[in-house]
Image (tube, grey):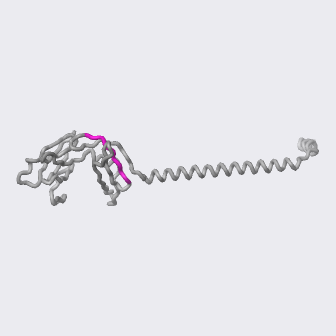
Amino acid sequence: MTNRENYHRAFSALHTSDGFKVDLEETKMRQTFRFRNAVTAACVILALAAGGTTAYAANIGGIQRTIQVWLHGDQTDAVLTVDNGGSYTITDESGENIGGGGGVALEADGTERPLTADEIYDHLTNEVTTDTIDGHLYLLYKDQKLDLSDKFSDKDAFYVTLQDDDKELYVTVMKDGSLASSPDRYMVPGVDFTTN
């Protein structure tokens, strides 16, 4: 007699009860129910994660960064907030708005895109400004402060080269305080930029 026949003869006298069959079906249903719960929970977690990522990518509140800017010739702590459109605001430590603006960059294919937070920060840390203090017009660049009051005489524009480490910046300043700057050459009023 073969093993198969021996097993068949030994176990043929045993019969499973109907209750055992029901338990087997309940176990299978319980496993299916647990699997469905696990799949549902995974879908909910995935939806929450995707929603959170979308809200982060939408940048609802804007990117905020604490920076140091030169304000009236003094280095000041401020908060730079940049939105998706390339606009920015600068607030001081007390929350008072001290500046803002925006800009776009031109890509190689001619399309415009909003400036990134890093590009705006680079611009702000290298910004040249003018300020009138006690009736004198000053040119402010980082820690440099130049009195321009007696530089104009009969001219409407004054040209100055600013040094910063190994870089030169060519600045054209108008009598009204407006200015234009370039790392390559002096900007010509009425040709390269408009004045008031």
Seen from the viewer's position, the closer of residues 115 and 101 is: 101
Seen from the viewer's position, the closer of residues 40 and 72 is: 72
- Quick check: 104 above or below 166? below
Seen from the viewer's position, the closer of residues 102 and 90 is: 90
Q: Quadrant of the C terminus?
A: bottom left
Seen from the viewer's position, the closer of residues 196 and 179 is: 196
Q: Is residue 159 magenta?
A: no
Q: Position of residue 28 (x, y in %)?
A: 76, 49
Q: Quadrant of the N terminus?
A: top right
The secondary structure that dominates the magenta segment is strand
Residue drawn at (32%, 50%), measured in percent from left and top? 89
Residue drawn at (25%, 40%), measured in percent from left and top? 75
Residue drawn at (30%, 55%), measured in percent from left and top? 103
Residue most extreme to the left: 154
Q: Which residues are magenta?
A: 75-83
Residue 98 visible in image: yes
